[in-house]
Image (tube, rainbow, N blue to C red):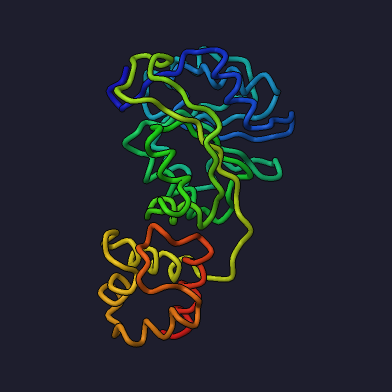
Amino acid sequence: MAKLGQHFLTDKHALEEIASLLDLEKNDFVVEIGPGHGELTEKIAVSGCAITAIERDELLAETLREKFFGNEKIKIITGDALKILSDEKIWNSESAGYKIAGNIPYYITGKLLRTIGELDEKPSVTVLTIQKEVAERLSAKPPKMNRLAASVQFWAEPEIAIVLPKSVFHPAPEVDSATIVLKPTPERKIKPDAYYEIVRALFSQPRKTILNNISGALKIPKGEIEIILKKSGIDATLRPQNLSIDNIFELASVFASVK
């Protein structure tokens, strides 16, 4: 059943620990992505909260409907989570806000994070089990900042909560996994497009200095950029991996104002 890149988490203790990260209450609403056989769904359901589970595999989805038949608080949707999440009307409930959980196939991780980041209403908490290496990348700080981390940390503060060896999955993946908790950050006064533009520019060539990257990507003379960087208190010779999120926000704000 791994044809869609799924590796099913079977360790009961790990499943209970993941469910606890959602800090569930009876009136909560959880969107679960890729429920598989419903192992995590069962642990989430213990709280009595409402669950909408999105499963792409039709056979698995039908099995889940049979498994949770009679539980009116659990709804199974068959389809592509990336498309369904973008149409919030499909799964929105009467609950005040919602939470997202899931054991995510590695190949959709980046696209899923972008989709969540673009939602008008962000989840109050997102708990995802993903490839450990990816979890480490998106939670990185200086001097290991990278494009993925900068993009995700625009809208959320990530924290690795659990490291899961490949042995607790079936079939076992080739690498270890990690469960990451994403909590929304306070909204900053900058348009997302302006922020992502500077992120793309900064990390266009990670081995080069931020001066060279910004100049090359935005087609601005280096002399002008040096003046802007000096006013912002940022060393033009730094590599992008040495910048903090605050540095990147500062740069995005400055360059947005001079365009």
Q: Pick the residue in front: 59 or 180.
A: 180
Residue 137: give x, y in percent of width and height: 40, 44
- Is 142 drawn above or below residue 72 in the view shown? below
Residue at x-position 35% and y-position 39%: 108
Residue at x-position 70% and y-position 23%: 47
Residue 44: give x, y in percent of width and height: 62, 23
Q: Pick the residue in front: 164 or 36.
A: 164
Furthest toward the right, the residue is 26
Quadrant in which the N terminus is drawn:
top left
Can you see residue 105? yes
Q: Is residue 45 left or right of residue 161?
A: right
- Is 83 drawn above or below residue 56 in the view shown? below
- Is 147 drawn above or below residue 90 in the view shown? below
Residue 153: give x, y in percent of width and height: 50, 53
Q: Is residue 174 left or right of residue 141?
A: left
Residue at x-position 53% and y-position 64%: 246
- Is 190 drawn above or below residue 169 in the view shown? below
Quadrant in which the C terminus is drawn:
bottom left
Please tell me in which quadrant of the rendered image residue 147 appears.
bottom left
Residue at x-position 37% and y-position 44%: 110
**How many labels sit on residues?**
0
Residue 165: give x, y in percent of width and height: 42, 20
Can you see residue 54? no
Q: Pick the residue in front: 9 or 77.
A: 9
